[in-house]
Image (cartoon, rainbow, N blue to C red):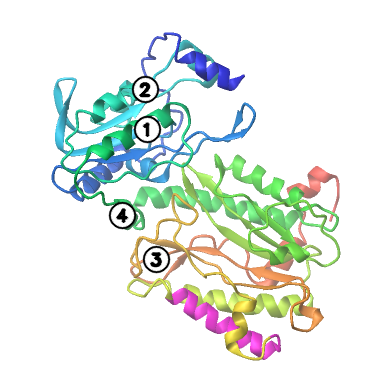
Amino acid sequence: MRRLAIALMFVLGAAVPADYPIFETDFIPPAEHKERRDKVRTAIAPGGVAVFFSNPERNRNNDVDFQFRQDSNLLYLTGFNEPDSALVLIPNGIEVNGKTVKEVLFCNVATPMSETWLGYRMQPKGAESILKIEAALPNTDFANFLNRLPTGSAVKATLPDGPTGQLSRMVDAYRTWEAKTSAPKPSLNDTIAKYRVIKSPDELRLMRRAISASVDGHIEMMRSAEKGMNEYDLGAIFHYVIGRRGCEYVGYPNIVGSGPNACTLHYTANRRKVTGDDLICVDAGGEYHGYTADVTRTWPIDGTFNPEQKAIYELVREAQEAGIRECVSGKPFSGTDRAARSVIAKGLVKLGIIKKENEAGMYFMHGTSHFLGLDVHDSQGANVLAPNMVLTVEPGIYIKAGSPCDQKWWNIGVRIEDDILVTSGAPVNLSAKAPRTIAEIEKLMAQTGIGNVLFGTDK
């Protein structure tokens, strides 16, 4: 039904609403997006043109789509969060509606059908007045507009994967136009990554909100955890809490892995019933206005670490502390991984789990850090740390059943992950409110949480 409605709404005429409704005021200011576009234009070769496409709407099944999420580069440059759109930057300028402009946004227009089924669209008029885009046009004008652009040089666009509908027609028009251009077609992805890796005060404000909501979700899961719950029960608690805190979505599918599932890095089925003294590794982060958190905590379902769990947990925490100490301006991005990996290798030898330090990769098989922002694995925009970068520090140890070590270690999977802000001084742990020490975790888990109330149990 929804696809039928979308098809019809472009056939019927509709009055353009006077303004696009804005229900919140804590988005990135339009002036900051404008500044970003101006900076990117300076990186375009003389006579060049840059095109940035929206993400496509993605089908889930039959006539149901996934919730739309804008392409991160287009969101970074405009704040525009609607599909079937494209931004064109023209440093030399072009005439649109009687004025010379250096940027044009193409977007959907409204019809009575679209307003009935999907609500208001921002439309070209709203994009100009609200987002302060110099010029905005209906996306149906995209192909004709491209044919007006110079063909002497171009900057290659990052084309969306699997475009459909109007976006597909826009991409086809771009491919036809680009084939006519004669100059080399470099990408601006690396340039934008260098800008995105340094967070502005407004970006940090949104990230702190996403991280704070996520930390509250982790805390409530710990409080609520008890034997007999399913992994999805705990995941539902997290979704509830971050939703109440204003997050529109999660930054990535929740990982709630218990027992053997804690040893699978990107386990997302979340269907197992948690029993005994299983450890639970929860990697979950909320997304607020496009900016995501990424936090992991590991804890025992019965609220008490056994000796083997305690030994592995303390080793991972020691490795994380070593990695966090490397999150200092002027130090290499790779320093966090080297520091954490050294601690884990030495510790595993001491515990008798491995014989040589170079065997540690068997149980610690992923990197320690990645940048964080509009994407959970944000653009790798630098190899040397600088103030206002945010990165994760997330060492882990995962010992699957059947591993070549004493069976007492089997099915122990531990990861501890925090979101670290690089400053001009000491690093700041933005997610530190979520308990990390064994004593703090066990104390919190003795409390009654919202999940216990909902399930009618009393810890």
Within the magenta stretch, is there residue 9?
no
Label 2: how many Cα within 10 Å (few below 14, some 14–19, many 20+): many
| Residue at (72% x, 59% y) in the render | 257
| Residue at (65% x, 45% y) in the render | 239
Cα separation between marks 1 and 2: 22 Å
Cα separation between marks 1 and 3: 42 Å
> Residue at label 3?
422
Q: Where is residue 58, by image quadrant?
A: top right
**At which x and y percent is residue 294?**
54, 57
> Residue at label 2?
123
* Nearer the camera: disc 4 or disc 3: 4
**At which x and y percent is residue 30?**
31, 37
* Nearer the camera: disc 1 or disc 3: 1
> Residue at label 1?
172
Kind of residue sitting beneath label 4: Tyr
* Nearer the camera: disc 1 or disc 4: 1
| Residue at (39% x, 19% y) in the render | 109
**Circle on res. 195:** 4
When the figure is inspected, residue 127 is found, relative to residue 72, above or below; the finding is above
Dominant SS in magenta = helix
Q: Which segment did they paint magenta?
A: 335-353
